[in-house]
Amino acid sequence: MKGKKVLVKPNILSDNDPAKCVSTHPAVAEAMIRFLQNNGAEVFMGDSPAVHNSKFRADKCGLLKVCETTGAKWVNFNEKTVDKKIDGRNIKIAAIVDEVDLIISLPKFKNHELMYFTGALKNTYGLIPGFTKALLHGIYRDMDSFGKLIVELNKSITPHYFLMDAIMGMEGQGPGTHGKPVDIGLLIGSTNPLALDVIACQIAGYNPKSLPTNKIALNEKLWLQSFEDIEYNGPALDTIKKAGFRKIPVSANRNTAIRFLIGRINFLRKLEKRPVFLYDKCTGCQKCVKICPVQAIQPTLSDNRKTILADNKCIRCFCCSEACQDNAVNVKIKIFGV
């Protein structure tokens, strides 16, 4: 470790109070940084949130303060990028990945409206800077294709170690501020991202095979030949599973034929979960407008509605809900109205 350059990559969805459990807790990041520094490493830290512009500072979440306290160097992923060939496309990646010897990933134990649960594999997606992440949602439009992208990204860039912050997790409508903090009381570590995600899913009460990233990686024999290959060294899972953890309902509409029909019959589309705007909470910040990969959300001049959703364009990526810090975008089934 001595003399090595190490990137610590937390999960910063948005710059919120650590108590909301939106991001990796600063205490976990600081402990990892100090461990690395005590072993002679030069440490860098950075991430790219859902809405990453020139004004972004990891201030409210406490991670910038951790850098100031420890002397770790904060990296703005937007400032310098490199192109990597991933899934046959040239995708911009934060250049720091080629400038360090090791990458340590610090995912957060959270639900995710699109992917059900977010973990080690999903946290690597934050290496893609700025609004490129949202644009890729416009190309990879459903959970299976998006899951394939995440797996391909991790094949290209696999962090060397993963430590999941599961001391306090998020249940309910994660990964943004609609989710609710919940006491989990764990740290989960592994050099194997798939193994970590499988264990974390079980602690949350999910069937690990219901997560697209887990299923795709396992089918390709990446990181594991089977779930039985996991070398687990910890308390019996039955003793640490979070009873009553509020999960994202696993969709029955994964069947290709059903998805085909839903995509072409407007009434059936209304039976899916979709973004629902709570205009009494909307501040007009237009982060949802900026992040929408298919321009399905547009600003209006109405006093009552500051934005409007074109439902026929919406691809159900839920980026708008992730980006909104005012709890003004809910995700639910709503047959009537907009």
Image (cartoon, rainbow, N blue to C red):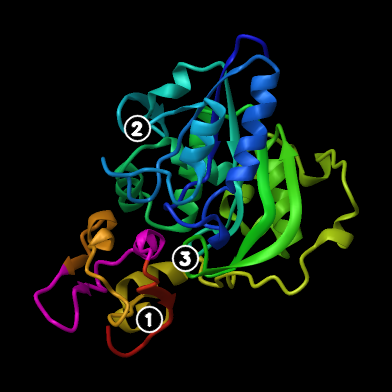
Q: Circle 3 sits in a helix, a strand or a loop, which is it?
A: loop
Q: Is 181 placed above or below 11 here?
A: below
Q: Which mark is residue 177?
A: 3
Image coordinates of residue 280 in percent, x first then y, are 29, 82
Image coordinates of residue 264 in percent, x first then y, are 31, 72
Q: Quadrant of the C terminus?
A: bottom left
Going from N to C along the chain, the mark reached first, 2 or 3, is 2
Residue occupied by mark 1: 268
Q: Is 18 placed above or below 5 here?
A: below
Q: Amino acid at mark 2?
A: Ile
Residue occupied by mark 2: 91
For the residues labelled 3 and 1, the Cα–Cα distance comes to: 28 Å
Which range of residues does the magenta coloring cover? 299-325
User: Residue 311: within the magenta?
Assistant: yes
User: Residue 11: within the magenta?
Assistant: no
Q: Main secondary structure of the magenta part?
A: loop
Q: Is residue 15 visible?
A: yes
Q: Amino acid at mark 3?
A: Thr
Label 2: few (<14), some (14–19) or many (≥20) C-alpha neighbours in 10 Å: some
Going from N to C along the chain, the mark reached first, 3 or 1, is 3
Quadrant location of residue 329?
bottom left
Q: In this view, which residue lies farthest toward the top?
A: 3
83 relative position to 21: left or right: left
In percent of the image, x 34 and y 46: which residue is there?
136
For the residues labelled 2 and 3, the Cα–Cα distance comes to: 28 Å
